[in-house]
Image (cartoon, rainbow, N blue to C red):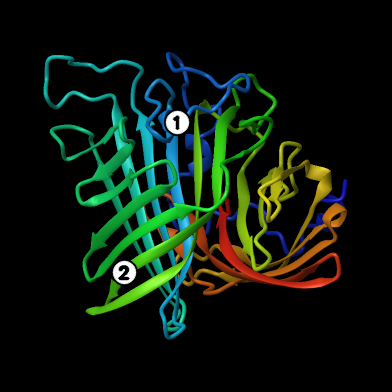
Amino acid sequence: MLLAAPLAGGALWPRRDRGIDAAPSITRVLGPDASAAGHARVTAARPFRFPDDHAAHPDYRHEWWYFTGNLVTPSGRPFGFQLTFFRFALAAEAAFEDSAWSTRHALLGHFAVTDVASRTFHAFQRLERPVLGISGWFDRPPRVWLRDWRMSLLDATRWSLGAAEREIQLALTVVSRKPVVAQGVDGYSRKGAAAGNASHYYSQTRLEAAGTLVLGGVRHTVAGHAWLDREWGSSALDADTFGWDWFGLQFSDGSELMLYVLRGADGGPGAYSAGTWCAPDGSVVPLARDAFVVRPRAQWRSPVTGVRYPCRWEIEVPSLGLWLDTTARVPDQEWRALFRYWEGCVDIRGSRAGRALSGAGYAELTGY
């Protein structure tokens, strides 16, 4: 396999490394040890329905709305951002239907801003019960909120995003400039061999973003590009999957690339690693595991947890003539909250079909 060959020996792709912390494993939450009993399962493709599928799917055990992006001020100062809302079902049924505090769900929010110029990473977490209006969701129009953190669909193509924590405030309107991309096979994304280890998965790969960012008491006008990943299901990973490396990359020629490598205990790629390339005209090319190569080229070691993460990658998609040198814009973009993982903005330099290519995006690393 193209993906497996350059990873032999795992010299630059670290094996599982718990480091010095005791953060719970995000892969365990999504793996076979977590009960999916009583919840709907993802076992086949089904057509997406919008705007309904932008809203919550409470019959499934988990789902997320995952916004990331790269922004710049008029003077050229760059920032990265992440605003993610997770819904987890705590039980298949509520315990006390007659109580205003009764709920079978929890909402988790992650909000981060990377100040590239100062090489600082600001990350915040909220965990709430969706009761009494403190947090929750609406279906029409689709909306999710955790106190004053919020995301809402304004119309068929526009989202409003907002979050504030301490001295940092972000308010954005993001507009989709391309059709929704159904990941996997018509949105049915297999993550493992066991029945139901899959998700319904779609992306909005080219969101035009504009708004304001307040950082350190200074208000910045910002604009740039963002990405939305939407997934829901009730189980996902097989027992021999210990983490993943995900990339959402946006290029100067108007194309995008999504890849994820599901890693086994030895650090090598699993059979269900996959991706998609989205052409400038919106057409999509699915990529199986053997269609791309990801070679970690450098590592960064967290001074807090002691965990080693890749921070630079060489990526090739031979069938597209695509070669990329992808580098973390700031090495320290490690989350040290309820879950420990690395999520951060990246720079891209490379070529496609012999023509120079540049861009930016986000990478997510778990299971290290």
The three-letter amino acid code for the residue at tag 1 is Asp
Residue that appears at 43% across and 40% down:
64
Lateral position of residue 138 relative to residue 305, left or right: left
The amino acid type, in three-letter code, at marker 2 is Thr
Q: Which residue is mark 1?
A: 53
Q: Nearer the viewer, residue 354 or 264?
A: 354
Is 275 on the left-hand or right-hand side of 319?
left
Q: Quadrant of residue 124?
A: bottom left
**Label 1 Cα neighbours within 10 Å, binned few <14 / some 14-19 / many ≥20:** some
Going by the image, does 8 lie left or right of 260? right
**Sequence order check, earlier mark of 2 and 1:** 1
Q: Where is residue 90 shown, x and y percent of the image?
A: 33, 27
The secondary element bearing badge 1 is classed as helix
Is disc 2 surrounded by few (<14), some (14 to 19) or many (20+) residues within 10 Å? some
Which numbered circle lies on residue 169? none
Report the quarter where the C terminus lies. bottom right
Q: Residue at x 57, y 49 (%)?
A: 178
Q: Position of residue 88 (x, y in %)?
A: 37, 33
Residue drawn at point x = 68 percent, y = 52 percent:
281
Q: CA distance from mark 2 to mark 1?
A: 28 Å
Q: Position of residue 275 (x, y in %)?
A: 70, 45
Q: Is residue 272 visible?
A: yes
- 342 shown above or below 100: below
Q: Which residue is mark 2?
A: 212
Q: Residue at x 28, y 49 (%)?
A: 150
Residue 95 point in image, percent of width and height = 23, 16
Q: Can residue 338 be seen in the rendering of this structure?
A: no
Badge 2 element: strand
Residue 302 vertical placement versus 188 (above, below): below
Quarter of the image where one finds residue 117: bottom left
Q: Is 138 in front, or is 163? A: 138
Nearer-the-camera pick, 320 or 28:
320
